[in-house]
Image (tube, rainbow, N blue to C red):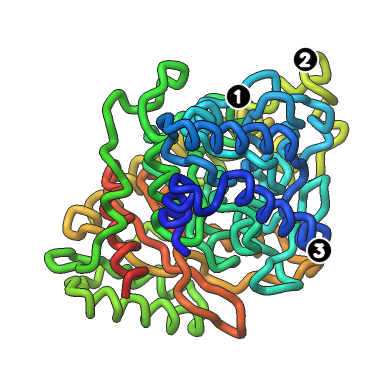
Amino acid sequence: MKIIDKLESIKQQELTATENLEQMYNVIEEKNDDINAFVELDYERAQKVAKNIDEKIKNNEKTGKLAGLVIGIKCNINVEDLIVSAASPTLKEYVGSYNATVINKILEEDGVIVGLTNMDEFAAGSSTETSMYGVTNNPNAPGHIPGGSSGGSAAAIAADMCDITLGSDTGGSIRNPASHCGVMGFKPTYGMVSRQGLLDLAMSLDQIGPFAKDTTGIALMLDVITGYDPHDPTTFNKEPGEFLKDTQNRSLDGTTVGIVKEFKEVTDEKINKQVDKSIDQLSDLGAEIKELTFDDINLGLPTYYLINYVEFFSATRKYDGRKYGERIEEVCGPEVGRRIQIGSYISQKEFSGKYYKKALQARSLIRNDFNKLLNDVDVIAGPTVPKLPHKIGEKLETMDMYAYDVLTVLANITGIPASSMNAGLVNDIPVGLQLQAKPEEDHKILSTMSALENI
């Protein structure tokens, strides 16, 4: 059943919001010990919200866009009265004192928030192995990582623990786990969704976005969380238009899809084969396929990580043990420590010109060149992640871990929208098709996903 059909059945009371929550909670109780997708549950409050929605429907009162749907939230997004730890010992006792803007929007539209999901510590990772809560298992490839940093949110969808989840994406942290877990994940255009209440990893790159099993779930959540927020000056002061309409698309006539040669060259051949099948389907749906080249691909990772290090170092200066929890340097894990140390080093006056300013120049170059690529096409299609997820506990060198992000960081560097959806299996492990479009052309991505989904 598609998410939109479930929503309708709740509004018709064929399935009550309370029953939907109970069903989801039973799955969480049954599976979470093995999967470790949820790190905190808020069942009692969720029950009250669900009961209130059922009462509204019985009394013929208007209900919201998410009426009775069960939602999971990445644990770096502030939810009042829950432990918002970002999976770090630094904030292990930090109780959210307010709701992030996206949380208020979900509650206003009658979404039922069931709890907080696991992640890499402070979102600094691509595997969800660095969490203080322990690793999350991949429901669709048991024994393998679910990807990261929003691994818990992707795994919760893959394991049918909730209808929609929220994650955050700084360099692929929504799309990477969506690919590994075989679900849909969507990173909106930078500025489309408020970041107020999100614990920063890198403020100029971070964006909140949804996971779901189908495009109606993605669209419903985008319709709720997008839009201007006076508390976040980076948000666009205009209406983004309705996303649910995009999920009716059946044809790609008149659509041009770009395929970038260099994206395929860095990707495992077996993954390319599966992605090529999806690209053939795009062609069958009427899309014109156009080959492109992008010479800046090798600039992506160093540019991204230099900006990430400096902005993360700056963001973590507030965790000094006075206002919030512990002093971060004293309790954090090795990857967070590495990023703080490097960020501190390259933020120094004598090095900032050598590294950070050069990274900003490279960012401008990448943005200009990527926008030129997008001028000639409606969307760019290709693999989401260039290699399969490793086994849990397998030791990787730092640069091998960073290599997971080579195809996803470009969308964050340029601020464009991007998504991942399942393109098939390699060795029984899901692999993703990534779609990217011009800034504020999120609708084109969703309608392309819809056409593929509706085959």
Q: Residue 346: in sight, yes or no?
A: no
- From the image, tell me which residue sits under label 2: 323
- From the image, tell me which residue sits under label 1: 99
Measuring from the top left, give residue 271's x and y in whole percent: 49, 79
N-term mark: 3 or 1 = 3
**Crowdedness near tag 2: few (<14), some (14–19) or many (≥20) residues, C-alpha within 10 Å:** few
Vertical placement of residue 411 versus 253, above or below = above
Q: Amino acid at mark 2?
A: Lys
Nearer to us: label 2 or label 1: 1
**Crowdedness near tag 1: few (<14), some (14–19) or many (≥20) residues, C-alpha within 10 Å:** some
Q: Secondary structure at mark 3?
A: helix
Q: Amino acid at mark 1?
A: Asn
Alpha-carbon distance for marks 3 and 1? 29 Å
Q: Residue 256: in sight, yes or no?
A: yes
Does the residue at mark 3 contact the one at mark 1 (Cβ under 8 Å)?
A: no
**Crowdedness near tag 3: few (<14), some (14–19) or many (≥20) residues, C-alpha within 10 Å:** few
Q: Amino acid at mark 3?
A: Asp
Vertical placement of residue 138 versus 13, above or below = below
Seen at 32% across and 70% down, the residue is 454
Seen at 71% across and 37% down, the residue is 86
Seen at 40% across and 44% down, the residue is 188
Q: Which mark is residue 210?
A: none
Vertical placement of residue 100 versus 369, above or below = above
Q: Secondary structure at mark 2?
A: loop
Using residue 417 as the reference point, say whether residue 172 is left or right of it. Answer: right
In the image, farthest residue toward the left: 254
Alpha-carbon distance for marks 3 and 2? 35 Å
Seen at 65% across and 44% down, the residue is 123
Foreground residue among 37 and 15: 15
- From the image, tell me which residue sits under label 3: 34
